């Protein structure tokens, strides 16, 4: 029953099931999503959907552990993905189009710096080849997000702003100081 509710919640932008998952306590939601994630470990599509749902619905206080788990999983998967077009696979697309824009609304300090840098590099890579592969990648997004068209359109219009803002946010979140660029070399 929980699995069925989750599938409905993750496949629609508005539904009673989605509202239920959004309103339950953090501990219960983390238990449910962690349980689903572990239970469907062999079902790559469903596991990805569970983890992306956690990223998209998280707040500063809610499901930080799940967000770290999702980022770890997605960043690890980009190196093992074999369906690559122009050096980009589905996990690259998930990171660039769903995770990076979502992180602009979050505090990144609980995400390891190495993963944040992977997110930035991946988003740059996807942005560079997005225009020529957009339709194919929208099909990939359709599998995991009910509002894939909106997400795709947002990335098309704002990819470079997302990259710039993610870099700025990373510098601030990790207290990396000012990025000094010497133009007189």
Image: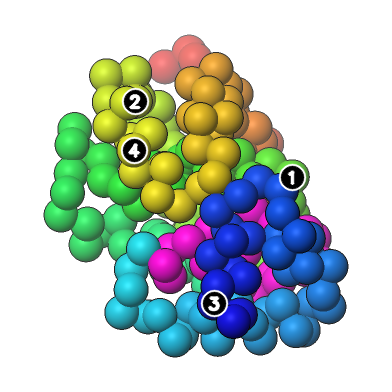
- State how far apart marks 3 and 1 are (Cα): 28 Å
For disc 2, the marked residue is: 134
For disc 1, the marked residue is: 105
For disc 3, the marked residue is: 3
**Which is more N-terminal, label 2 or label 1?**
1
**Which is more N-terminal, label 4 or label 1?**
1
Magenta residues span: 46-67
For disc 4, the marked residue is: 139
| Figure colour scheme | rainbow
Q: Quadrant of residue 64?
A: bottom right
Alpha-carbon neighbours of circle 1 within 10 Å: few (<14), some, or many (≥20)? Answer: few
Dot 1: element: loop
Q: Position of residue 113 (x, y in %)?
A: 55, 59
The numbered disc on residue 36 is none
Q: Position of residue 156 (x, y in %)?
A: 48, 21
- State how far apart marks 1 and 4 are (Cα): 26 Å
Q: Nearer the viewer, mark 1 or mark 4?
A: 4
> Which residue corresponds to the image point at 42% horizontal and 67% vertical from the top-left?
46
- State how far apart marks 4 and 3 are (Cα): 23 Å
């Amino acid at each position: 029953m929980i699995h069925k509710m989750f599938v409905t919640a993750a496949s629609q932008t508005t539904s009673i099931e989605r509202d239920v998952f959004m309103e339950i306590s953090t501990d219960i939601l983390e238990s449910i999503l962690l349980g689903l994630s572990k239970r469907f470990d062999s079902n790559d599509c469903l596991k990805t959907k569970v983890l992306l749902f956690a990223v998209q619905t998280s707040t500063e206080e809610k499901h930080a552990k799940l967000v770290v788990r999702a980022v770890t999983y997605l960043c690890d998967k980009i190196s093992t993905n074999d369906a690559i077009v122009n050096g980009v696979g589905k996990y690259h697309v998930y990171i660039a189009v769903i995770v990076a824009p979502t992180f602009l609304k979050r505090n990144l300090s609980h995400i390891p710096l190495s993963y944040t840098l992977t997110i930035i590099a991946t988003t740059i890579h996807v942005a560079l080849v997005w225009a020529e592969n957009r339709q194919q990648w929208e099909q990939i997004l359709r599998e995991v997000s009910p509002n894939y068209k909106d997400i795709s359109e947002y990335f098309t219009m704002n990819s470079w702003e997302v990259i710039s803002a993610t870099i700025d946010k990373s510098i601030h979140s990790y207290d990396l100081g000012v990025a000094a660029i010497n133009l007189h070399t």
